[in-house]
Amino acid sequence: MRIGIEAQRIFRKNKHGMDYVVLQEIKELQRMDTNNEYFVFVKPGEDRCVESSSNVHVIELSCPSYPLWEQWALPRAAKQYHVDILHCTSNTAPIWCDIPLVLTLHDIIFLEPRDKQNKSLYQNMGWLYRRLVVPRILGKCKRIITVSNFEMKNIVAKLHIPRERMAMIYNGYNEWFKPKEDVSGVYKKYIGNNGYFFFLGNTDPKKNTERTLVAYSKYLKKSSKKRQLLMADLDANYLNDIITRNNIENIRTQIVMPGYIVNSDLPYIYNNAFAFLYTSLRESFGIPLLEGMACGTPVITSNTSSMPEIGGADAILIAPENSDEIADMMLRLETDEAFYQKQKEIGLERAKLFSWQRTAEQLLELYQSIK
């Protein structure tokens, strides 16, 4: 088969969730499959994280915007290279394309009520684009992949897609997320002392940043250790608004915000953290949850959406809307050594159930099933 894979954003320097998923899928397919021919369509960028090989061809397509790249440049290139199927990996696909489509629909958050407090132009434009495109492409897709049973049930129920057209393929995590000694002190590039709480917060309301910071304020008032909080990817003005609105000035000197943390440094960040806060309101999968567990770092996560499915029944599952519950669990980890050690063991065992190799094997099987 000649298989096209849309991977528009994998060459950008600051990658995020969906970028890492398709990047790891491509690398695993490149390693394991020598029978099929792959055409990976990307937008030019500075991080050339995949190189062409004998049967994997990286095709760079220049176009000024995401919609134009996907709706115009991508289908033209796929037709030019005579691909048999085109796998679009990031929720959307070309509306006008006569090549059989496979779509990875990570979630349908764009159909759910929109938080009016979200001022991010980038996130709001993405939300609108998905609302316009997705309904127009679903009927054209040979198969629709999603990443958890929670999300598959959600998609089938809300979009009325026949179950036989759906496929559930779990994500994995990179093998370098594991317990390791930070002999070079990599974490010190971001924070002075280890034993901190780590939180991947941003301005997307679903990440539950505000309630998590309120919980951290409550933790500080009761803790004798008063551990710092390392927060990646958060805007200082956004933080200031939260502090003012909630009257939690006590957190200001305890928070460290280094900006974007490169993926190769994250294993050291997890390993040197006391615990990882993954208190999102909604996730279709949640790769950071696995990364933290695989490093042997206790994770406080939510009892909503896919997180109980991925974290397992023995994970620390809290109600994310309840800041008291988050704070109480932070304090329990700090004061109950037996509980803390048990959570390290639970995470390490749970992470063994997931891998990018298993993801790619299931993806290849799906490709081969399409006639």
Image (cartoon, grey):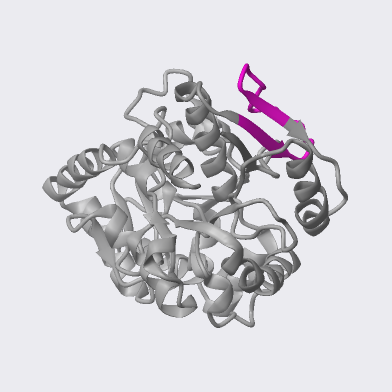
Residue 238's image quarter? bottom right
The residue under the point 73% across, 43% down is 78
Percent x, y for residue 289? Answer: 37, 50
Q: Is residue 212 visible?
A: yes
The residue under the point 32% across, 41% down is 354
Residue 67's image quarter? bottom right
Residue nearest the viewer, comparing 332 with 281: 281
Above or below, 320 relative to 284? below
Above or below, 11 relative to 31? below
- Image quadrant in which the N terminus is located: top right
* Residue range corresponding to the magenta coloring: 38-58
Judge whether residue 46 is colored magenta: yes
Judge whether residue 24 is colored magenta: no
Q: Is residue 204 left or right of residue 343?
A: right
Q: How many marks?
A: 0
Percent x, y for residue 267? Answer: 43, 33
Residue nearest the viewer, comparing 110 with 176: 110
Q: Is residue 102 left or right of residue 237?
A: left
The residue under the point 55% across, 83% down is 113
Above or below, 291 relative to 52? below
